[in-house]
Structure formats: structure tokens, C-alpha cells
């Protein structure tokens, strides 16, 4: 997520420089053939090209609206996870109590509270890693995104492993168990449920409080499922494919259409075809790419939901609720990009 006022021109140009160079060359080819070789038949009437431009603008606008909705829904879901995480912490702290007249040591009660909260932090990290895992339809593999991340952002999972993130949050036996499963986050909530059942059997959680905490686990499963739905179901490929094809079709026709228009102004004006081809094509490329960069709000681009920073914020809040002193620092933006 960009945390500054706006992307700079330098950043935008760096992101799209390959396309600008391509369309400068593409615009130069028919211009040279027209002005030097004398192939005046290369021109096309601008009216049908303008009609195509109108259709392209509509379909690009449709895509951008749909992908923005995906991004905003993802942000709302993770915002709900923030709220539910804080609610889970106060439940763990206030609902887990020693039974009146029982022989339970207060240290065991504190350990149970810590275990429930630490395991929840582990669940947040597991969910984060799962949401950052690449999919075939995502766009971070494209060269312009890789280059932009290398220069302006960081890959927060480069050299990091989920096993390292879970260390110190859950026991080694439990860590080995959940890591052996295909969906670690799901298994961690299942472990929370088993732990609640054992605490209830020991009398550390009252019946009604046990039900409330189980309901909170169901809610967390629901939020995880919503994240997985966005992660695992892409923006429909038929729309994405046609959108890109139409933009490329229009951009390919630009120099042939404006060539004749500039020729009407005078012999030397035809050379303006080259820069204006790049400018017009760049505008449509940017509109299409904005939608593309918003399609998958968890893939880890500069325009995604900053789930790593949000996870760190939740972890800080929960550790402070426990009264711990070894608190990690909040993540700060790098080049105004918060991951």
C-alpha cells in the first residue's frame, strides 16, 4: 500500500518505461515508412479508431471498478480480523480464570491465557504467509512488477519461512504438527478449539464463556474463508483477457490513425505521430494496469492490502495486553510503500 501523498512521476515512469519505449518504436515505424519511404497508404481514418477507443474506455472502466471492489473488500475483511483479534485477546485474558475453591495454580492460568493469545498471533502469521503465496494468475512475476519491487519495495517473505515466524509462539510438537498439514492457519484454529475444550474440562472457562470463545473461533474461520475466496478465485479470466486484448488492439492502431491527421497540418507535422502515439498508448496502458495491479489484493504488490504491517500491529497490541516487554517495532513504509 502506498502510504504517501501519491506516486511520483519517477516511480510511474520507472514502472511503465518499457511500454513507453515500445510505443515510441511502434509509432516510429509507420511514420518513417510514410515520410521517407512514401507509403502514404498506411494511414487509417480516425473515426473508427475513436469508436474502438470509446469501447475500450468502457471495458477498462468496468474492470477497474470491479477490481477496486475486490481490493476494498479485502481491506474490510482484514480490518474485521484486527477487531476480532483484539476481542479474542480480552476474552482470553478475562474469561480464563481459576475456579473458585479449586486447586489450580495462578501460574497455570496465566500460561493458558498466554498460550491462547500466542497461538492466535501464530494464526495471523500463518494466514499472512498463505495469502502471500503466488498463484498462476497473479502479476508479480511480470518483469515490470519485479523490477519495481526490487527498487522501491521489499519482498517480506524473501528468506523468511513460516516455521521461523511460528517459533516461540507455539510449542515445537504443535509446530511440527500444523506445518505437516496443507492449511496451517486452519489447523491452528482447530488447536485453539481443542485447547478451549480442555480448559473448560478443567473448570478454567465457564460454560457460557466457552460458547462465546468458540463463536469467536467460528468468526475467525469465516474471516479466513473470505480471504481465501479472494485469494483463490481470480478476477474472471475472460474479462481480464479481453480487456488486455482490446487495449493492445487500440494502441496498435493509434499511429496509423493519427498519422493522417498530423499530415493534414503539414509535411513536417507527421513526426509528431511518434510522441503522441506513446502518450495516448501510455494513458490506456496505465488505465489497464491500474486495474491489473488491483486484481489480487494479497499478492504483495505496492498497491495491495498491507497485511504484513497490519499483522505486526495486531501482534503489538496483543503482546502489550499480555504485559510483555519484548515488543516488536511497527513496520514502517519503505519509499512510502507499506507491505
Image (spheres, helix red, strand yellow):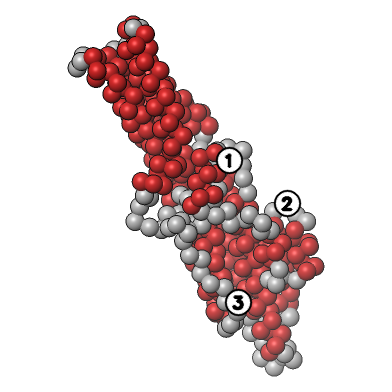
Image position, residue 86 (x, y; %): 52, 71
Are there few (<14), some (14-19), or many (20+) residues within 10 Å of tag 2? Answer: few
Which of marks 3 and 1 precedes in the sequence?
3
Which residue is the site of mark 1?
141
Residue 192: give its label.
none
Gap between marks 1 and 3 measured at Cα? 41 Å
Q: Position of residue 269 (x, y in %)?
A: 24, 20
Q: Residues within 10 Å of mark 3 (few under 14, many from 20)?
A: many
Residue 197 lies, with reference to residue 158, above or below; the image says below
Q: Nearer the viewer, residue 189 or 45?
A: 45
Tell whether label 3 touches label 2 (CB within 8 Å): no
Element type where label 2 sits in the image: loop
Q: Which residue is mark 2?
A: 182
Distance in Å between CA atoms under marks 2 and 1: 24 Å
Disc 3: which residue: 92
Q: Quadrant of the N terminus?
A: bottom left
**Nearer the camera: disc 2 or disc 1:** 1
Amino acid at each position: 500500500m502506498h502510504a504517501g501523498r501519491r506516486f511520483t512521476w519517477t516511480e510511474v515512469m520507472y514502472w511503465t518505461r518499457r511500454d513507453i519505449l515500445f510505443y515510441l518504436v511502434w509509432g516510429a515505424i509507420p511514420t518513417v515508412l510514410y515520410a521517407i519511404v512514401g507509403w502514404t497508404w498506411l494511414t487509417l481514418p480516425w473515426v473508427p479508431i475513436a469508436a474502438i477507443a470509446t469501447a475500450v474506455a468502457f471495458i477498462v472502466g468496468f474492470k477497474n471498478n470491479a477490481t477496486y471492489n475486490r481490493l476494498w473488500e479485502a481491506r474490510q475483511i482484514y480490518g474485521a480480523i484486527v477487531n476480532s483479534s483484539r476481542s479474542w485477546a480480552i476474552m482470553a485474558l478475562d474469561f480464563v480464570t481459576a475456579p473458585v475453591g479449586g486447586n489450580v495454580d495462578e501460574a497455570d492460568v496465566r500460561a493458558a491465557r498466554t498460550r491462547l493469545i500466542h497461538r492466535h498471533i501464530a494464526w495471523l502469521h500463518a494466514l499472512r504467509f498463505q495469502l502471500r503465496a503466488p498463484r498462476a494468475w497473479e502479476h508479480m512475476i511480470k518483469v515490470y512488477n519485479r523490477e519495481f519491487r526490487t527498487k522501491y519495495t521489499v519482498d517480506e517473505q524473501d528468506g523468511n519461512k513460516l516455521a521461523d515466524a511460528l517459533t516461540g509462539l507455539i510449542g515445537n510438537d504443535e509446530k511440527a504438527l500444523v506445518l505437516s498439514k496443507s492449511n496451517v492457519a486452519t489447523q491452528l484454529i482447530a488447536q485453539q478449539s481443542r485447547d478451549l475444550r480442555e480448559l473448560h474440562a478443567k473448570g478454567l472457562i465457564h460454560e457460557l464463556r466457552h460458547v462465546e470463545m468458540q463463536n469467536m473461533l467460528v468468526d475467525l474461520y469465516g474471516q479466513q474463508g473470505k480471504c481465501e475466496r479472494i485469494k483463490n478465485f481470480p478476477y474472471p479470466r475472460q474479462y481480464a483477457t479481453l480487456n488486455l486484448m482490446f487495449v493492445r488492439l487500440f494502441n496498435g492502431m493509434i499511429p496509423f490513425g493519427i498519422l493522417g491527421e498530423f499530415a493534414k497540418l503539414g509535411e513536417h507535422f507527421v513526426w509528431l505521430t511518434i510522441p503522441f502515439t506513446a502518450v495516448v498508448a501510455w494513458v490506456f496502458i496505465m488505465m489497464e494496469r491500474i486495474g491489473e495491479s488491483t486484481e489480487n489484493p494479497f499478492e504483495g504488490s505496492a498497491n495491495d492490502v498491507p497485511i504484513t504491517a497490519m499483522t505486526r500491529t495486531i501482534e503489538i497490541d496483543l503482546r502489550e495486553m499480555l504485559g510483555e516487554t519484548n515488543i516488536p517495532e511497527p513496520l514502517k513504509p519503505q519509499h512510502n510503500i507499506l507491505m
